[in-house]
Image (cartoon, grey):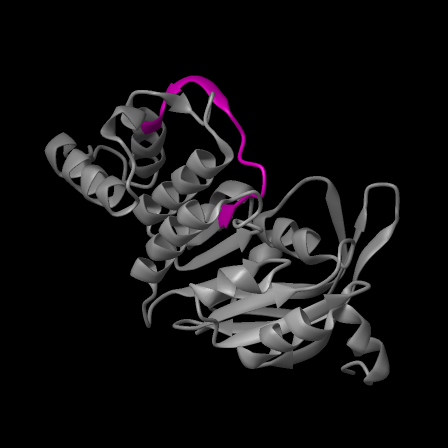
Amino acid sequence: MSLHIQDLRATLEDGTEILKGVTLEIPKGEVHAIMGPNGSGKSTLSKVIAGHESYVVTGGSVTLDGEDVLEMSIDERSRAGVFMAFQYPSEVPGVSNANFIRAALQARLPKGEEIDAVAFYKSLYKKMDLLDMDRKFTARAVNEGFSGGEKKRNEILQMMMLDPVYGILDETDSGLDIDALKVVAKGVNAMRSPERGFLLITHYQRLLNYIEPDHVHVMSEGRIVKSGGAGLALELEEKGYEFLKEEPALA
């Protein structure tokens, strides 16, 4: 079972083509990293999978364990097990972290069932402790007044509580100092499982020092142009993206 992307093409609303035929398969149990220069389409890929309304799919397919993701609403994608951690997490004034996560979990239960409050907070606190988050954050409004690192930890906390089948992390390492990066990586690594896959989007090798990927892919001009093992990220760190111009792109 896998998240399968086949010849995916997408444009902005004004018709500007961003994705120009992306093919990628992420089996459960694997961590795949996508690297590439600015403007290569990395973040667009993640947003198209999540159902962001700013993009128009013009071709190809995305399937989750055989189900057509592109035909699903954003809510249906989430319920099917897709979680998206954004590069710039949004603030939700007036809604506490605890209530936000609890409402998301409650929405997934069959009609008439209620979340057990004791079990909910026991699970929440356990995961907050793993992420070195002060428990006072449960009462704070979602991301309001949070530092960059706190927002990213909060995204990982939400992911851990929602327990998705596929986690898509769009530049989660952006703006993090080394301590915050290690904590975020600790949370992701704690979730690695034969029943869960991850797609990590990053500019830098440093994230992959703490979350070792099974496969690394390089995007350029809207396509996957090179794939390899974890060593490919080290090669990119050493040589930059210029060396890709010396090699033939993937068909």
Q: Who is closer to the viewer here, 100 or 182? A: 182
Q: Is residue 203 visible?
A: yes
**41 magenta-colored:** no
Residue 37 is situated, as x and y percent measured from the top left of the image, at: 75, 60
**Outermost residue to the left:** 118
* 127 relative position to 140: left or right: left
Q: Is residue 7 visible?
A: no
Residue 202 is situated, as x and y percent measured from the top left of the image, at: 60, 58
Which quadrant holds the N terminus? bottom left
76 is higher (above) or lower (below) than 237: above
106 is higher (above) or lower (below) than 232: above
Count every numbered label the image shows and give the total.
Answer: 0
Residue drawn at x 57%, y 46% is: 174
Q: Which residues are magenta?
A: 84-97
In which image quadrant can residue 211 be found? bottom left
Residue drawn at x 14%, y 34% is: 116
